[in-house]
Image: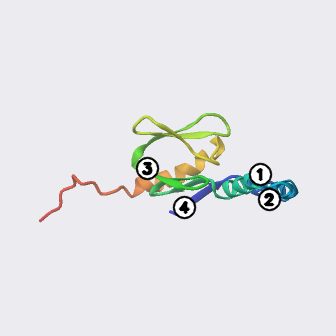
Amino acid sequence: MRQQKFRYNAAITVAAVVAFFGAVPLATSRAYLLPVALVPLLIAVWGWRAGTDVSPAGLRIRALFGSRLVPWSHVSALVPADRKRVYAVLTTGRQVRLPAVGAAELAAFSEVAAAKAAAPEKTDDTETAQ
């Protein structure tokens, strides 16, 4: 089973790059306005990078600067909040938002979950014949 990637629309990154070029004249006019040009760049990087990767190992949740792997053993349910937001409910009861995943994409998760169920992990309590 191969990994599936869910990302935001590339139009976010394109719009942020256009906004960066629009902000350059303002940012270069005064030194204290220089951070104005950083905002569109950060949005462009976030739009390009943020999302959710689904694999048999679990869910990799990517943000602007980092990522987090949530193994399937820690996920108790996937819950759609509305058409555009889906949360992973962890075994601890905590909810984690899955970026770039909407309710319509939940069907794609079933393929990975079925592959995971077909090849269960070895547990520590399995006895080996000696």
Front tag of 1 and 3:
1
Q: Nearer the viewer, residue 56 or 22?
A: 22
What is the crowding at mark 1: few (fewer than 14 residues within 10 Å), some, or many (at least 20)? few
Give the foreground label among 3 and 2.
2
Q: CA distance from mark 1 to mark 2?
A: 21 Å
| Residue furthest out toward the bottom | 130
Where is 60 relative to 83, above or below?
Answer: below
Q: Earlier in the sequence, mark 2 or mark 4?
A: 4
Pointer 1 residue: 32
Q: Earlier in the sequence, mark 4 or mark 1?
A: 4
Amino acid type shown at disc 2:
Val
Q: From mark 3 to mark 2, how far is it between C-alphas?
A: 36 Å
Q: Identify the mark nearer the N-term, 1 or 3.
A: 1
Name the amino acid, label 1.
Answer: Tyr
**Earlier-in-chain disc, 4 versus 3:** 4
Which residue is depicted at the point 64% across and 48% down? 100
Of marks 1 and 2, the one in the foreground? 1
Q: Earlier in the sequence, mark 1 or mark 2?
A: 2
Question: Which residue position is annotated with label 2?
Answer: 17
What's the CA distance linking mark 2 and mark 4?
Answer: 29 Å
Expressed as whole percent of the image width and height from the top left, the position of residue 1 reads 50, 62
